[in-house]
Image (cartoon, helix red, strand yellow):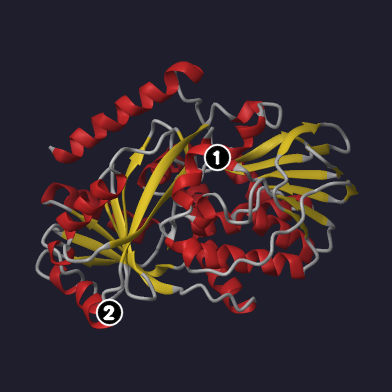
Amino acid sequence: MLLKKELGLIENSYYEASVVRPPPAPALSEHVNCDVCVVGAGYAGISAALELAERGYSVVLLEAQRAGWGASGRNGGQAIVGFGHAGECAIEKQFSPAEARQAWDITVEGLALLRQRIDRYAIDCDYAPGYLSLSVREKKSRMLEKWARHVMQVYEYPLQLIGPDEISSWIASERFHSGVYDANSGHLHPLKYCLGLAAAARKAGVLVFENSPVYVIQRGERPVVKTAQGEVTCRFVVLAGNVYLGEYGDEVAPELTASIVPIGTYMIATTPMGKARADALMPHRAAVSDTNFVLDYFRLSADHRLLFGAGDSYSGSTPRNLIERIRNRMVDVFPQLKDLSIEYAWGGFVDLTMNQAPAFGRLQRNIYYLHGFSGHGLALTGMAGKLVAETIAGQAERFDLFTRIRHLPFPGGKLMRTPALMLGMWYYRLRDML
């Protein structure tokens, strides 16, 4: 099971080591009535609960582990506009230009919403502006520039092209050929942000129950959401558990399991290098991702560590020699950091759709789901929660825009899906190398 595979790594998470969690919320042990039951205390679930509570709804939030235990507390911390190149391509193929622009603008609003919440709820999460997309060779640079000019022209979104002659002023690495800078995107401490949102939700009146995994939902006019020791009867259900919904059986939402798969992502954190050395490494201190299919992504922390993520696992298990492998990738990018020790290493699973576009929808009139953020969820999850709250309140136009994105199931069924994904990963890794 995913939960068992992840427990070893989360214990060595830099994010967990650098926060002080509040005492655990109680487990659900009674029968509760409310307007809305939200399943999953990550960004999307907490955002939905917070928005609904502030609109006057009574809300119960159920979490199988602790708030921010999943991808919301372990990710790369990059708050990025858009859906990723593949997701944007899928949306542009399926939507009219006006609809694609509306979807894009919702992601821009998601960045603004994130910053507004940081200010409104006084969330100390080390937010820093700036995001760099970097290409490793000339051919990929042409593709990156084509994408950037498309975004600037079609979506009227400001980006800055960085040519080969100026790349050294942005990053002290010979690996990269050129890049694109986005001043509106940024990065933060993801677990601090998630816990800050959870605190705001509690203050708004949301009843939070941790260590309360849902194992079945009785559907109907008033759904009943059941845990091992309690149950919630409600008018609406919002499912925001992503790849974890199937952990306790397929009775929660079996129709969703074929459209997303868990992809393992892993990170390391160096020992602190000091401010002067960190500033010399990346003078603008922007978050960075390369444009390879199997990509490297990294950023500087507030205490001047390099947080470096590399590679993905499609097998559902943690790769061997994880720390050594990621450290080698880090030293390929920054040979000057080979003297630094690795103090933390951790990982987790994100939810991926076939076309890498988000998947929002309804299982029935009063049961909604939010998943498939495909590695671009830090900003979009906040908007997902806002859109589903708008829909429950009677304004479904923006939510329904996303429900029209078509998603194909992953091929191979339960037995062959993982081998097929691993084969695909190696194909794209080979393309990156060649």
Residue 135: give x, y in percent of width and height: 20, 54
**Drawn side of residue 78 relative to residue 212, left or right:** left
Task: Note whether residue 110 is visible.
Answer: yes
Q: Is residue 196 above or below residue 368?
A: below
Q: Which of 19/262 is in front?
A: 19
- Disc 1 to disc 2: CB gap under 8 Å: no
At label 2, which amino acid type do we have? Gly
Q: Residue under circle 2?
A: 274
Q: Indicate which disc, 1 or 2, sits on the residue closer to the N terminus.
A: 1
Residue pictured at 66% horizontal, 63% vertical: 198
**Drawn side of residue 18 relative to residue 342, left or right:** right
Residue pictured at 85% horizontal, 57% vertical: 58
Q: Which of 352/388 is in front?
A: 352
Task: Note whether residue 384 is visible.
Answer: no
Residue pictured at 13% horizontal, 58% vertical: 177
Tag 1 secondary structure: helix
Residue pictured at 48% horizontal, 69% vertical: 18
Q: Residue under circle 1?
A: 3
